[in-house]
Image (cartoon, rainbow, N blue to C red):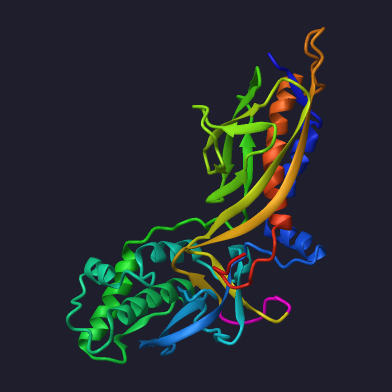
Amino acid sequence: MMTKALKGTIAAAAGIALGLSGVAAAQAQDEAAGDDVSTLASGNVVLEDGIRLHGQSQDPEATMIGLDLGDGETRTVYCIQIEVGLLAGNLHEERPWEDIPVEQLPLVLGVLVNGYDGHNAADLLAAAGVDAANLEGFSADQVAYAGTQAAIWTLTDGWVLEADSTEGGDALDAAVTTIKQYLIDNSEPVDEPDFEPSFEVDDSAAVAEGTKVGPFTVSTNFDSVTFAQPEGATVVDENGEEVTSFTDGQTFYVEFAEEKDATVTLVTDTLTWTTQAGRTFVPVDENAEGVEGQRLILAEAHTSEYAAEIEFEIAVEEAPSESPKPELPVTGSSLTTVASVGGAVLLAGVVALVLMRRRRAAANWGSDA
């Protein structure tokens, strides 16, 4: 049986994992390297005519708002501050909820789960019991958007619709009010979606048997991380089949070419990251600094692929075999365990470097990296 130990320690493994601390750290590394890379989503505001609403405090128009992704697509977003003006000329960039001065965001996301996402107007009207045949000349999309926006303002600002709730007649009033109330009555709080990327490998069950080390289990919120097979080793699944990408919950092994000291290099290819519905956006200036203006919330998910050409080397060396395996201080782990932890160093390190060094990705969503 091959007993290998990776050059490194448990502390080193923890350090690599902490290197994957989120987008901000990756951006700082990229800026230092002269690259402009981020998994942060951003876009320019696109406006379409909506329906004017009548409320007790003011009569805003539920203008249909989207973010231009830069690839010919827009994603539906909503205002979450009725008293703050929209800066339509500014780029809007993703921020975590803790940076958004708005209460009730979990309930707002609950509304978005059931509300209009830019594609489901007919389904929403039917679910709310609205007669889609009598919308007084407005489209189903406009009515669905207005009802969803009214529900959001009700939660974020305590805004109250008048009985004469729209610029239209009784049928339009009833349609918008019914959708608004349906969403309020049928939505439960939803936690904030992931803002920062994460990638961890559980090595607790890993052992070295002959030339094979594993199993390792991936825990990540990336949709996928792809890579080329390394020289001198093969990444395989539990059936011995080659693996060229990692997804959440995946189990894998590393099969070395032979039982000897070796250096294995894993070269990443791409990673896929989804900006989930419920992510919040703020207007920013030319320096990407947040400025005072209407905050927006995303109603539909958006997936982007980022290219990466990163090498991460890991060296293995023969552990002493003439005496019992030495115990590591404090943890009591054997050197075989160090080898399995090293596998986690390898894979976590790859993703950290992907974030730090992948080539330039355009600022607008969906742009080719």
Q: Is residue 135 left or right of residue 1?
A: left
Residue beneath the point at 31% across and 92% down: 167
Q: Which residues are magenta?
A: 287-294
Q: Position of residue 84 (x, y in %)?
A: 55, 84
Secondary structure, magenta segment, majority class:
loop
Q: Position of residue 100 (x, y in %)?
A: 60, 69
Q: Quadrant of the N terminus?
A: top right
Foreground of the two, 165 or 75: 75
Q: Is residue 75 left or right of residue 295?
A: left
Above or below — where is 162 with respect to 339? below
Above or below — where is 43 with respect to 205? below
Q: Position of residue 295 (x, y in %)?
A: 56, 76
Rendered image quadrant of residue 282:
bottom right
Rendered image quadrant of residue 292:
bottom right
Residue 193 visible, this angle: yes
Whether residue 290 is in magenta: the answer is: yes
